Image (spheres, grey):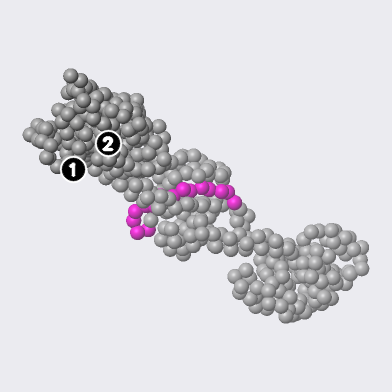
Amino acid sequence: MATTLKSLRETVDLRHLRQIIAGLDEGVILVDPDQSLLWANEAALTMHGVERLEQLGTTVDDYRARFQLRYRNNHRLEADDYPIERVVAGDRFSEVVVEVTVAGEDAPRWVHQVRSLVLNDRDEDAPSCVVLVIQDVTDRYQAEDRFEQSFNANPAPAVICRLADLRFVKVNQGFVEMTGHDKGQLLCKTMYDIDVLRGAERRDLAKERLSEGRTIPQMEAELELPGGGTKLVIVAGQPIEMDDQPCMLFTFADLEPRRKAESALRHSEERFTRTFQMAPVPMAIGARDGHLLCEVNASFTALTGYGSAEIIGRSLAEVELWAHEPGRRDIEEAIESGRDLRGHEARITAKDGGRIDCLVSTEAIRLGEDACVLWAFQDITQRKATELELVEAIEAVMKDTSWFSRSIMDKLARLRAPQPDAAGAGLDDLTAREREVLALICRGLDDKSIARSLGVSGNTVRNHVARIYAKIGVNRRTAAAAWARARGFDGEATAVSHREVPA
């Protein structure tokens, strides 16, 4: 007649069995069919935070009173659902995961993965002993909880796909907000339904890596949206395990704002280019550093004769556009110092060698990442020619008219010739006699009157006048008078010495 395990507590077989079980990492609890707890190894006691079997409970009812169990979905187990109750009832199960809470506490302390084992006597079908085998999976599930919280809280859009069937098993709020997909519906779909690698630039590589469960490098792709249309993204895949199943974590970066910004910039640049090319004002675009031209419009070509192929990639100085070297330096120094020019008068040289008077304006702009300068040229050659013709006509009519308004003569002189360079000749460069002659010129006297005032011959006056013109860089009396007045010399305060003309 078979005896129960309980009656063999001190037999050699039971001692050997205890010695074998005691060394296991898994927790083992032996339960008699009469629902009394026979024995538990040290691992099982530690997994419940106790040191002796009595603290675990002497019966199944004691155990249930001391420890409250619930499933991972927070659903509390009924009495008949406790693994220890099920194993006593003869239920065989391979894996049940429960959270274990000490009575009187709110938060669970451990997560146990439990399986059952039923021991029968050789001659009887009734179980002689039932066994609970317990694994402490607290750390694993806590890590999964942390991952779950981090995954859901991460603002970066992400989904997890199970490699076995390519079904989506997790999706975070960032992906839902980016695409507009319904979270519940998405978890019922596979990558065949929603292709997260659609339009990927290296799609073949991505599919190969996915099939092998290897890392998928970052690449651009287009996600199809539920309401129609697509969204440009960067997608990358990282292999992970969830519930001991190989999966792929896909993360995304939304490139749609960048695509819209690039599209707006492209349209803006296209509008700028059309406006630039169609503008009636001659314009050019050059680099701020080095002044190399990168674009000219049709009006610039018409003005200078230089086509795009001839001038792009060269500086204005290299093509010798500027007629005067000092003027070129002044313009380039202004730009290099960060100043924009407005209506700066300069003279340029056309391709055929012709000289063109211009008003030059510049504006600092950016094209992409490059600092550039927009050049605008206004041709004033005809206007200046008309002004000179007008002055010459007035001078011809009013020549030698001493009563003509001195202020008008000064203004005409300024129109006729630009103001001399301040760095040129000064009053100190004239001799005393030349300053006397200049003073009389400023008073409106002609050569004969000056000769009588100074008591010299007309030839002597003409020689003095010629030397004055050469020194101050003018060729007309009105210009000489304007030059003198620009330096605060009007001749009124100058004493004129009289010399008699030799007999």
In terms of sequence position, does the residue under pointer 1 or pointer 2 come before the other? Answer: 1
Q: Nearer the viewer, residue 259 or 316?
A: 316
Disc nearest the viewer among 1 and 2:
2
Q: Main secondary structure of the magenta part?
A: strand
Q: Amino acid at mark 1?
A: Ser
Number of dots carrying numbers:
2
Q: Nearer the viewer, residue 154 or 345?
A: 345
Image-based side of 147 in relation to 82, left or right? left
Residue 141 in magenta? no
Kindly give the residue lying farthest to the top in the view shown: 503
337 lies above or below 178? above
Q: Amino acid at mark 2?
A: Ala
Residue at image mark 2: 495
Q: Residue at left 65%, top 78%?
A: 78
Image-based side of 140 in relation to 2, left or right? left
Q: Nearer the viewer, residue 10 or 354?
A: 354
Q: Quadrant of the C terminus?
A: top left
Residue 328, image x, y percentages: 34, 31
Q: Residue at left 91%, top 66%?
A: 11
Residue at image mark 1: 407
Kindly give the residue lying farthest to the front in the view shown: 503
**Magenta region, residue range:** 226-240
Residue 290, image x, y percentages: 40, 32
- Mark 2: give few (<14), some (14-19) or many (20+) Cα within 10 Å: few
Is residue 94 shown to the viewer in this render?
A: no
Q: Dot 1 lies on which element? A: helix
Residue 201 figure quarter: top left
Is residue 329 shown to the viewer in this render?
A: yes
Q: Residue at left 56%, top 52%?
A: 247
Q: Dot 2 lies on which element? A: loop
